[in-house]
Amino acid sequence: MRIHRWYKKKKKNDNQQKDNINPEVDDSLESLIKQMKVSNDFIYFKNDQSPQPIHLYYFMSLVDSEIIHRDILPYLNRESLTSLQKLKQELPIENIEITSDVNKIEQKVLRGSIIIQLDKSSTEVALIRAELNKAREVSLPEVEFSVVGPKESFVESLDTNLNLIRKRLPIPELQIAEYSVGKLSKTRVAVVSIEGITNEENVNTVKQRIQAIEFDTINDSSYIVQLITDNKNSPFPQLIDTERPDRIASVLAEGKVAILVDGAPHGILGPTTFIEFFSAFEDYFLNWITASFFRLIRLFAVIFSILITPIYVAVLTYHYELIPKDLVSILVISRREIPLPPILEAIFLEIAIELLREAGARLPTKVGQTIGIVGGIVIGTASVEAGLTSNVLLIIVALAALASFTTPVYKMGNTIRLIRFPFLIFAHFWGLLGVAICFCFTITHLLKLTSLGRPFLEPIFPPRISDLKDAVIRLPFNFQAKRPIQLQTEDTMRFKQNKAKDKREIDE
Amino acid sequence: MKAMQRKVNERYMITASLVFFLIHSMQIGIGILSYQQDIVKSAGNDSWIAVIFAGLIVHIIIWMMYKILKNGKGDLITIHYDLFGKWLGGIFSLIWIIYYWAIGLVVIRSYLEVVQVWMFPDISIWQFSLIFLSLVYYLLIGGFRVVTGICFLGVVIPAYLLLTLIFPIEFTEFRNLLPIWNHSLKDISLATKDMTLSYLGLSTLLMFYPYLKNPERSQKWAHGGNLLTMLLYAGLMILSIAYFGQGYLSRIIWPTLTMWKIVELPFVERFEYVGISSWALIILPNICLSFWAASRGVRQLLRFSQRKALIGMLLMTWIIIYFLQERQQIEMLSSYVSMTGFYLIVIYLPLLFVFSYLRLLRR
Amino acid sequence: MKRILLLIVICLLGVLSACVQKQILDDVQLVTAIGYELTNENELKATAVTPIYKPDKTIISDIFTETGPLSKEIRKQLNMQSSRPFVSGKIEIGLYSKDLAQKGMLDLLDTFYRDPAVGSRAYLAIVDGNMQSLLEKQYGQQDNGIYLSHMFEQNIDTGSLPRTNLNQFLSAYYSQGIDPFIPIVKQENGQVKLDGHALFRGDKMVGELSAKNMFIFKVLMDKYTKQDSTAVKLTETNQREGEYVSVLKIRAKRVYKIENTTEVPKITINVKIEGNVEEYSEGQQIDKKIIKTAQKSMQSQVKKQADDMISMFQELRIDPIGIGGQVRSRQRNWDENHWLDVYPNADINVDVQVSLTETGIVE
């Protein structure tokens, strides 16, 4: 009820904002304060001890009471305090603003400033920042955990997050443009880029898209991702979100644009490529050979995860000829008792695995783990024994699920689990041919995708051989002197390449 | 009537090197599954020589095409318009458009025939072609960049199929190829003529030329694409003769598929089913590029919406495919289209080349 | 957006109603071997072997028999006996009785090679003796089709069986200058064993090669001989009369020399054999002298056997080792009829060189 009324009034206020040309300013400040007083956490008090009565207004819930008690109230008793200008000299706070702009007052007070008024009828007030910053401590990254490397992750406060990035890139070229997005939430959104490296076009695309957002509340960075992404009807994420400040710093240096949102412990990166979703940031902490090996494993895991169950269904339903003669008996024996056709068997198990995953994700950590293990073992064994599924398929589905979790970006992992189902259905109807058709649809879709207007499938298509240095395999750092062509950076060299490549003579 | 579009927006252009994949993917299609039979019937163990001769002829044709396009500045439709005027040029253009469209039709129907014979005798033709054509539509509305993309991936991804050709080698007898050149020149030229048909897809170059960023530099890539096609055809021909012997080879309709029957890996036997399925990705560029060329032609010629032209064409294809039921009909259609292609490319194009050259000289 | 939805709906409708005939692995009756013989009424009698997978994970084979005029007709009749449809995709071996092979095999093979489901690696064999009792007996842990297929595979890799399968047979049948052969199997003491080869002229069996000649046959015709073995009787000196060495891991190579191809051709086959001596009947030290003796004995034995074998082929006017093909590949304008005329009188010599390199881990 109350919210409703407030919202209504707010709307009226908005309208007033629009009609600001013929101002009834006086009336407005008064009405603003009146409107706010409806909320119980809005505090007004008159400081009578001071030589001259001073009026203070603020939201108790937004203001750090320590600042009021320590830095403001003791100084208000001074004699010299005769005007608001004097206040600026007296208070040990750097950012005191004196204004009569009601909109500004409203904005500031709702962000945790204190209004100081000397005379109740005066329209001019001083605004003192005293917001309460209650944010989580910087903690371990949980989604993108890495064994080696930095162990800090973003928190819900934009300022802390920007601090984490700036600490890693202490250069003046690091530019941050801030926007306020969301009609109700007024969320601060920061676009971070490095001048002279990042392509202006990319930065402008991001800025334009953010400014064009029409939404009421932005609760997380993923809202922004969904609102600015190139193709909103695609299951594939086209922007990476990461919780690692080191990853953001490093891709900024590569020439990408980062977006940080207040209240979200994730940053957004763009433009990205399809391959980048399968590279963990940990790859850069390991030796290039190991890192490349793990990347290949991950890529294999993705292909395996998407295709293996559909291929099982296709082969068992239509193409028994394909099965090697020594494998036939294993498959037939494991399936002999099962009344369901392969497709139902597969869907049953796939859904069981999805249920376990979903349950594990929703429940508290400890319980979730137990559910995962118990469910996996009990349901798996029981369904094989009951003759609902074959144990060969159980192994296949479990491996496929495991493989889908190797994807370092969580959202991509979800996509991979999702696109298995259309593949399964096609496999059921047209066997391997159906799998191939579905595959054609998928790559066509991927070909059409763009990330901030840049081709998503790069460096595979358009083929750019030099960008393959950090795609499927990661070459050593001395090969990485050039920034990716995909980003069309203004300064293409990351560092001077060491030209001394003469082969040293043996034993000299 | 609005003027034809002679220059394409830089944003939609593609790099010159991709011509390699456009040409190559268009040449390799459904034909490579079955081209051996006709050639072997006339040239026997010398068939591979005919394959190479045909490839060389096609090289000359590519060179001619580039000359025509360079002189003409624009695509085939504008060149026709410039050389022959509105009506006569329009009629020539229309013939080409129908030819492009017919290639797409023949490829998809022949593929369906392979599927019917080898995998699913009772597959519903209208349903499969509906899904496949909607895939083509989905792809084509992405524009030429996406078409190029599928041509590239349609070459790169199925390249793994080449590895499977190792397996027949165990059972080959390369002595079957000897003695070299024991056929008359007449036999070989007859086989060369038949073989030229397998290379013909490249004519779409006449339509996508304005989309190339550095058209001059793309010529070597076009030749490269054709060279790869030639090597593939010749290599496969040599392998087929060595594996089957020419007597048996001339009796098999799809030798490439039959050859896959010998593949035996620890996890998969009988590779032809995997091969036929993967072939969907190989014929997709064929169909897309030819439908693209046809619909682009309609757009250029009649200033008709390309999207609508495309929908019309796909619907027509769908209906015709449904009525083409018998193998004889398919073969007849396919040979008509091949012959039209042969006359258009081997006879008509050189004439056009001479004509455009004369026009250039007169100026 | 609406268009995409429409597309999805069309796709789903298309897919959901598109059903192709399913062949779910455990709902079909896999035929792994099929035997054909003639009944007394001159009808065809087929015996199909299918595996039965028992709950305790053992596999036994089951047989179905049926008679009829056509082999596909028989399949229909077989289906009447079974709870699940018979499928031919896993046929590992086709067996034929001798009288059937003598009447001509091609019309029977037709069902095999016309059927896209049958693999090219399927083996063919002639059965000496009772077909039904050979197929009825349980030989190994698998069903009989797989058992026979493994037996053939093993003998090709390490024994005296040359590479043979359906494709090789057809390739030889349709090629000029080579005639096909098929191994013979027979049941002996409850076990199945390889017992020589059936030799064909065209598709009719005209002769037999005994089991002891299989080694020479493989040496003379197979592309690779790597793992063969034979016993050699030492004959050089009186002193060593009646002694034997066994030669293992035989590698053989051949070079043909052909002269005077027009009239009566003179053909020399140089055979180089390398092998290891692994057993000596006397159990003594194998010294250089014995090795030399063994080499000489082996040379003369192989030469004699090969000469005998080839003259038998010439008498039968058949050419299973492909001498005609060798001549053809060295000669332009080779005429098959002319060759068939001169072949029986051709002067064919086998020149053998044996080198025995190792003697195991003791001297």
Image (cartoon, grey):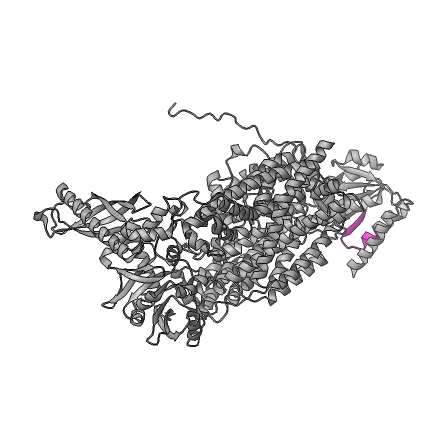
Is C140 placed above or below A287 here?
below
- Residue C155 % position (x, y): 29, 56
Is B211 placed above or below A314 here?
above
Q: For the view shown, which residue lies furthest in the front direction?
A: C263
Q: Residues in magenta? A: A33-45
User: Which is more toward the observer, B84 or C25?
Assistant: B84
Q: For the view shown, which residue lies furthest in the left direction?
A: C239
- A24 to the left or right of A203: right
- Residue B265 % position (x, y): 41, 54
- Residue C37 % position (x, y): 34, 70
Dividing the image into 4 quarters, which one contains the N terminus of chain C?
A: bottom right
- C295 to the left or right of A247: left
Observer able to see residue A238? no
Q: Is residue A36 magenta?
A: yes
Q: Is residue B11 magenta?
A: no
Q: For the view shown, which residue lies furthest in the top direction?
A: A508
- Residue A263 % position (x, y): 67, 48
User: Which is more toward the observer, C223 or C266?
Assistant: C266
Residue at 56 percent across and 38 percent down: it is A465
Is A397 placed above or below C260 here?
below
Residue at 32 percent across and 62 percent down: it is C205
Residue at 47 percent across and 50 percent down: it is B40
Dividing the image into 4 quarters, which one contains the C terminus of chain C?
A: top left
User: Which is more toward the observer, A379 or C111?
Assistant: C111
Image label count: 0
Observer able to see residue C246? yes
